[in-house]
Image: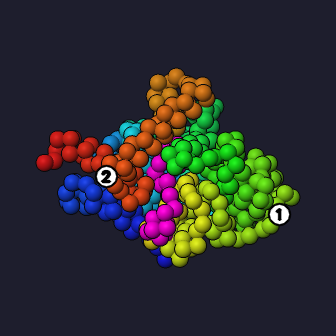
Amino acid sequence: MSGEVNPFESLQEQIDDAAAYLDAGDDVIERLKHPERVLELNLSVERDDGTVERFEAFRSEFNGDRGPYKGGIRYHPNVSRDEVKALSGWMVYKCAVVDIPYGGGKGGVVVNPAEYSTAELERMTRAFAEELRPFIGEDTDIPAPDVNTGQREMNWIKDTYETLEGRTEPGVVTGKSLDTGGSEGRVEATGRSVMLTAREAFSYLDKEMEGADVAVQGFGNAGSVAASLVDDLGADVVAVSDSSGAIYNADGFDPRDVKQHKNETGSVSDYAESEESMTNEELLTLDVDLLIPAALENAIDADLAEDVRADVVVEAANGPLTPGADDVLTDADVYVFPDILANAGGVTVSYFEWVQNRQRFYWPEERVNDELERHIVSAFDDLTEAFERRDLPNFRTAAYVVAVQRVVDAYRKSGNWP
Ligand code: GLU
């Protein structure tokens, strides 16, 4: 893991790389490289022993030209102002690439949730929701789950908001549990779009998914679901990892069984079917057909990229490759399908949840999965069309060319600007 690369600078570099192929004007591009506003908070939360602890928290609202700000809330000790700014910018371009009517936002609290009780996390989340209340709403800014948050936290945010507002507004937050206004298919949605992107990528590149060797770095929600769904397509998931380390089996694992083991024991590391344990870095440099980085930013920097031997990389995490790594992999003809397409299933099904909440009319899972597939396949086709027509260096630049153009169009056609 590289601690050196600032993700906000990576985002800006990715936008500049795409802008070089667009006729958008430097002034407009400059505007699209900075958040509209960043809220910085200090939450005072009572611990179970009666003492009060201060938690630093952020919410960045990056751009609202295409719709309300949209994006998750992350609980992690490495959360920082620049990380949240970067993640909120990636949301803008992610929503644009799959063409859903949202801008981008992201929030975070600097905390390791494993060190706190459920009651403490509930008080912290409700304190954050109270502070966010003037800024969020179904037409303004809509939080969702991200690293270390899920249905439980979203339910707390919705309940706090609705109690203070004195009305129901389930669409204020997405990723809720089914019984409080969540959508079928939302939990699996990020992993599902990773699988769909990998499937489309393999078909585009004339590669067989049946029997392909796959390594998955990170076995949280996105990584474990992606692993199970590519396994369903006939691929062999030969290596998986989490923060405890990586496991390998040349014949492939049953990802659902590994997930059950992780749920029971807290980690993948001592799974019985493992032939060999290795580090996360060793997993990332395995000679596989498909590599899925599904953990955090900067997992692969330029140095590590020199050793990557996968044919195709599909990014389940946000920002797992540094711009330096992108350059190395482009030169080495490793095909990278970027986060803003591959993991966009999460926010796409969040959009379906929000539509269902607003209509008070709920869809069966089959409809959710069909609509998701339609959005991801159509975005994949837009991206490869731009890649070929403009002779772009890689698929990330193609995704940003499509996405930045859509945001520029929304901005200019609002009529307020020349
Ligand atoms: N946190 C997810 C992401 O990075 C989902 C965001 C959402 O559903 O709004 O895309």
Taking the image as shown, residue 107 lies to the left or right of residue 125, namely left
Quadrant containing the N terminus is bottom right
**Residue 114 in sight:** no
Return the residue nearer the eye: 354 or 271.
Answer: 271
* Label at residue 83: none
Task: Residue 99: give x, y in percent of width and height.
Answer: 39, 40
Q: Which residue is mark 2?
A: 390
Residue under the image location 67 percent in, 45 percent down:
210
What residue is drawn where x is 72% and y is 67%? 245
The magenta stretch is 325-347
Residue 139 is left or right of residue 346, and the answer is: left
Q: Nearer the viewer, residue 195 or 311?
A: 311
> Looking at the picture, does residue 142 appear above or below residue 131?
above
Q: Type of residue at label 1?
A: Glu
Farthest residue, direction front: 206
Foreground tag (2 vs 1): 2
Q: Determine whether, in the image, residue 195 is placed left or right of residue 377.
A: right
Q: Amino acid at mark 2?
A: Arg
Location of residue 203 by image quarter: top right
- Element marked by disc 2: loop
Is disc 2 surrounded by few (<14), some (14 to 19) or many (20+) residues within 10 Å? Answer: few
